Amino acid sequence: MPNFCAAPNCTRKSTQSDLAFFRFPRDPSRCQKWVENCRRADLEEKTPDQLNKHYRLCAQHFEDSMICRSSPYRTVLRENAIPTIFDLTSHLGNPGRRRKRIKELSEDEIRTLKDRKLDAVVPEKENHQNNNNDMEIQIVEIEQSEEIAVLTAEEREYKDYLKSLFEVVLLMGKQNISFAGRSFKVPDEVYVPDNFQALLEYRINSGDDVLRRRFEIFAVNQEYCTRFQQEQMLEVCESCIREEVLLDIRNSQFFSIIAEDAVDLAGEEHLPIFIRHLDDANNLREEFIGFFPSHGDAEILAVNFLSTITEKWNLNMEYCRGQSYVASNNLSSKMKVVHSRLLQKYPQATYTLCSSCALNIWLAKSTPVTGVSVVLGTLEDIYLFFKNSPNLQKELESTIASLFLDNAEKGSELIEVVRSDWIRRHDAFEIIVALLQSFVLCFDKVACDNMFRWNTRTTSHAFILSSAMADFDFVVTIVILKNALSFTRAFGKNLQGLTSDIFSAANSLTAVLHALNEVMENIEVYHEFWFEEATNLAAKLDIPIKLPGRFRRMQHANLQPDLTSENFYKEALSIPTIQHIIQGLKDIFSEQHLKALKCLSLVPFVMGQLKFSTSEEHNTDLYKCDLPNPDTLSAELHCWRVKWKHRGKDVELPSNIYESLHLPDIKFFPNVYALLKVLCILPVIKVENEKFETGRKRLKFYLESTPVDQRSPHLAFLNINYDSKHDLDLMVDTYMKMLANNVKLEPMSSHSEIAEEV
């Protein structure tokens, strides 16, 4: 749909101008400023949503400093941009001219416009006011038809043709349909249409005359649209949909960044990036905004990460209040550099744990020990092996029941555990140790299948997993991880519990670190007990106790004759694991992070547990610059405590930030309101409503259901954000401008070129 400038006395249209056109903002206060500066009386009664949907202003009405042109696909406005350049008087000398309804100016206002025609006669004000939304839509449609009439028949057909292509691209992305559609290589002399072309042919056969006329002169075996052009359109779709998502994030001002563990997309490692923010209704939302390549050294990764956020995605890092990274082994050390560089430049971007990842899993993932990363990969394979097959899941449950005949209650409990997302739990290593015999026995039964219930692929996979688990290196690693992480299990569980539990966790870190330091000082004794548990478990499964094969092969003749397995695992596993846990806790629970968590005493339920004897003011210094009235904070906090201390007997204390933000009188406490909004977006705080974090679930489903070689960051983005708003006309206009402005991009073939080829 073409865009028309809503400014008075401005006749620019998007199809006749190279200028960018900007939607009215959804933020009510900012939208009101736009309307006031426009001086159009007919816009005053419209809601921000109506204005955002139907009205635009061209770039001519904004100062250059308000516009950011760093994006290769789209010109965007900076945060809080306000239009200030308007022609409010040129219509005065032409009373008969058809114009937008301009709000009449007072004498003082006219006098201030020195460069305008001051002696004009103001024409009679139009009396008709359109307050009906249906009528508004009809007017927009009329204007559209006027604009379409300006285009030539060839231009209209070309745009309709591009729309058809983009509709197919969006369909394939949202339905996760691979563009290739085949896993085998096609010989050059053989023509086989891919999925994209097959869908285009289906549309042509279904009556799409625009596509039919466009392609009827193509050779029979010629590609309708090259892979390069498909990639261009995919990038445009992703960019335009992302911009719609980012508009809401920018309007909410404060946000936090979450980078999940790297995923393999067609052979390249990418970090999924999520942004947390509060919407207009104060609901905590977590939006997936794209993938970020994780290659390169740590410093380059940090520079590219920051430039992507600030330049490509145009987010103002001055408003970033939290950052969190979930990364494995080698990538973990890189992400430490990334978060430290961001903290150096933006000190208020507090580094925290992510609520979606259990603390013990986060610590295990980042442990710099090869054996640990191997074990974690094996556990993921085991989890998916049973999760993806209901029949295998039943086989596992049957095996557990048979092994726990003498303790049916314990068996039932473990069966319920394996039906859950056990690999993400705080006690995942306790679970795998308790179920090790059940897993190995079940794998052996599947691998040695004499009833032909399972196919060859399943039995081969079961044999590989059984061999991996029936290895002493695997057994001793899971036992040591279970015992070493037992000191942080309750602490981590509290961090993902109720608000009062999170507050308690912030005050118990010292005790946790003290216990871990004591283990480190007496590691000889602790390791002896851990190793004994591992050897007993191995003996139960007839697993020989020996040094890992990779170590023996690397040592060859240099193997120390007096080196025992117990001493080897103490030096290679127990000591570095405990050291890493201690350092990991110190890194992620900085003084800044702990202060933020202690600010949760603002939640009335936590205040009640503390008998209303709280000292929030000291901890809130961290967010003093975010307060609307910092000078009155002390008095306001006192009133906030008194309000809840002397509440009525039938009034319940709000138990979390979400309930506190939705109190009917919360805005009478502007500083408390501001503090709660900033605290809410910290990555460590869980999202209360699951429907506002569906992006994470869709990402997980995409990765589990799509073969690695068919994954695409662009298609994945469209699939994960399949219900996000999209403007098809904007995509077409963006694509056409991209082709016109970038000579490096491959242009669409013209009719004459195609005719010559044929």
Image: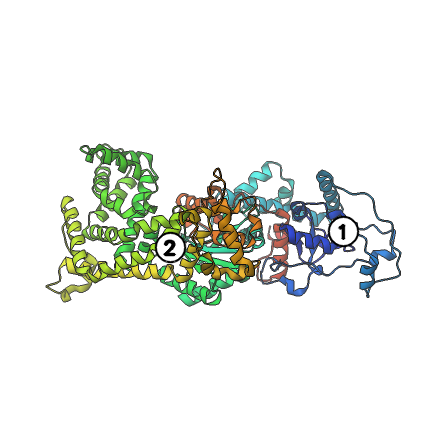
Q: Residue furthest front?
A: 646
**Where in the figure is residue 389, as x and y percent of width and height?**
33, 37
Return the mark for residue 506: 2
Q: Residues within 10 Å of mark 2 (few under 14, many from 20)?
A: many
**Where in the figure is residue 184, as x and y percent of width and height?**
41, 47
Element type where label 1 sits in the image: loop
Q: Residues within 10 Å of mark 1 (few under 14, many from 20)?
A: some
Residue closest to the eye, 702 or 667: 667
Return the mark for residue 731: none
Mark 2 residue type: Ala
Task: State whether residue 588 appears in this view.
Answer: yes
Task: State whether residue 357 appears in this view.
Answer: no
Considering only order in the chain, which callout, 1 or 2, is on the residue closer to the N terminus?
Answer: 1
Element type where label 2 sits in the image: helix
Dot 2 and dot 1 residues touching (CB under 8 Å): no
**Where in the figure is residue 601, as x and y percent of width and height?**
44, 52
The residue that disc 1 covers is 40
Q: How is the image coloured?
A: rainbow
Residue closest to the eye, 521 or 418: 521
**Where in the figure is residue 386, as x and y percent of width and height?**
31, 39
Nearer mark to the viewer, of 2 and 1: 2
